Image (cartoon, rainbow, N blue to C red):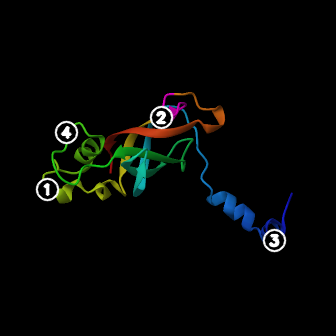
Amino acid sequence: MIDERDERELVSGQAADRRDRLQLPVLIPNGVYQVRSNRIVRRPLFDRNVIILECEVVGGRYDGTQLSWYAKALPRTGRIAPSAKLFIALCRTLPHPPTTPADLDPRHLVNHLFKAQVISVTRDSKRRPLPPAAWHAKISELLERLA
């Protein structure tokens, strides 16, 4: 049933614009892709602070596909584990190993071209199967910085 507001949007073309802005999960085959990092967001997810690096596939059949890379935020104080996903990504991005707090800023990951491992997400955080309509792809690892 179309209400008056939806009817106005259909007439004006705004509904198509709104649909284009809506980002639905995308599923692409597992593999290694070139991605360009566009933006970084810090937000709570599953009761912890998470860094989300929004990327776009560059080249190939899936050119322009939006994918995200997730990493636990580094602690503001104290020891940082050298095995932390964000720390490893910063080491691969910076020309030298991070040594100062300024080097640990996740914004260093933005506006770079990376070779990235992409995987399909078919289970939720509790390892239960997701319905096929909810399957999506995400970046599991930033393998190397290309530019």
Badge 4 vs badge 2, beta-carbon distance below 8 Å: no
Q: Which of the two discs, 4 and 1, labels the residue nearer the N terminus? A: 4
Q: Residue under circle 4?
A: 82
Q: Nearer the viewer, mark 3 or mark 2?
A: 2
The numbered mark at residue 8 is: 3
Q: Looking at the picture, does residue 125 appear above or below residue 107?
A: above
Q: Nearer the viewer, mark 4 or mark 2?
A: 2
Q: Which of the two discs, 4 and 2, labels the residue nearer the N terminus? A: 4
Of the pair 5 and 59, the residue shown nearer to us: 5
Residue appearing at x 68%, y 64% in the figure: 17
Residue 65: x and y in percent read 54, 47
Q: CA distance from mark 4 to mark 2?
A: 24 Å
Is 122 left or right of 36, judged from the image as shown?
right
Q: Is residue 125 magenta?
A: yes
Q: CA distance from mark 1 to mark 3?
A: 55 Å
Is 47 left or right of 84, judged from the image as shown?
right
Query: Seen from this angle, which residue lies furthest front?
Result: 47
Q: Which of the two discs, 1 and 3, labels the residue nearer the N terminus? A: 3
Q: Which of the two discs, 1 and 2, labels the residue nearer the N terminus? A: 1
Q: Secondary structure at mark 4?
A: loop
Check disc 3 and give the amino acid type.
Answer: Arg
Q: Residue under circle 1?
A: 100
The numbered mark at residue 52 is: none
Is the N terminus in the top left, top right, bottom left or bottom right quadrant?
bottom right
Badge 3 vs badge 2, beta-carbon distance below 8 Å: no
Q: CA distance from mark 3 to mark 2?
A: 40 Å
Quarter of the image for residue 141 reads top left
Does the magenta stretch mainly form a helix, a strand or a loop?
A: loop
Magenta extent:
119-127
Q: Is residue 70 magenta?
A: no
Q: Residue under circle 2?
A: 125
Check disc 1 and give the amino acid type.
Answer: Thr
